[in-house]
Image (spheres, rainbow, N blue to C red):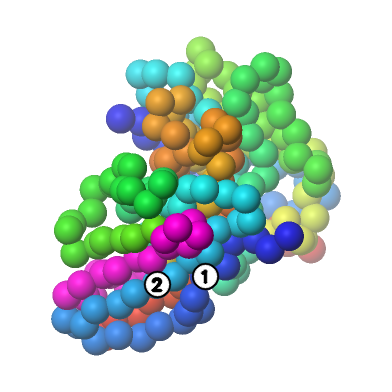
Amino acid sequence: AQSVTQLDSQVPVFEEAPVELRCNYSSSVSVYLFWYVQYPNQGLQLLLKYLSGSTLVESINGFEAEFNKSQTSFHLRKPSVHISDTAEYFCAVSRETSGSRLTFGEGTQLTVNP
Amino acid sequence: DAGVTQSPTHLIKTRGQQVTLRCSPKSGHDTVSWYQQALGQGPQFIFQYYEEEERQRGNFPDRFSGHQFPNYSSELNVNALLLGDSALYLCASSLLATGSYEQYFGPGTRLTVT
């Protein structure tokens, strides 16, 4: 079985500061990796994904994540955050052999302050 | 293009009662997965339906059951409700037939058991 650990439950930052949300996973087989964002009282929205190829993946709103196989990590970064980035962020993994079933981490609450 | 829809939005039930939640997948998708998200936690996989069959199941008791209809929509049924069943129930759809591992989530149904 696989598991996901999000190392920080809460990350407060000031607007325009850089941020990193950390995610480590464990799995004995190859995995696909995802970051989802959840705004208050809403469902989950896919932010970015790593399936294969380049280990650096980017989203349309300035977030990026790098797959590091040796460190089994998939940290999420943004060089300059906005107040609108305030949300809960979930890291998730899916095994190649398990279809699209996702295993989620506990989530990281990102709060961007003015 | 309609995304994933769920009904109802909110629901209040009493311990011991039964509840049915509904989900319509994104247009063109053939697979529906259900997740339970307790307050302050990441979503937990309940089960997945493909071709009207339960394809995978997470660590949930038999009180949780489901169904997928020929139009790919799905229902989640929970019998003998417990206080601990209070959570946000998320439905996600994907297109398994093409090997896509990307899931699209609905807004969820907030279930409160009193």
- Within 10 angstroms of label 2, few (less than 14), some, or many (20 or more) residues? many
> Horizontal and vertical percent for residue B13?
30, 85
Residue B11 horizontal side relative to residue B72, left or right: left
On screen, residue A61 versus residue A37, left or right, reads right
Tell me which segment is drawn in magenta.
B69-88
- Specify the farthest residue to the top: A70
Front one among A61 and B62: B62
Query: Which quarter shows the N terminus of chain A?
Result: top left
Q: Is residue A79 above or below residue B106?
A: above
Count of numbered badges drawn on the protein: 2
Mark 1 neighbour class, 10 Å CA radius: few under 14, some 14 to 19, many 20 or more: many
Quarter-of-image position of residue B25: bottom right
Name the residue beneath numbered marker 2: B21
Q: Report if the CB atoms under discs 1 and 2 are less than 8 Å apart.
A: yes
Mark 1 sits on what residue?
B6
Quarter of the view holding residue B1: bottom right
Which residue is found at the position 57% from the left and 71% from the top?
A41
Q: Amino acid at mark 1?
A: Gln
Estimate the x, y position of residue B45 in percent, counting from the top left.
Answer: 36, 49
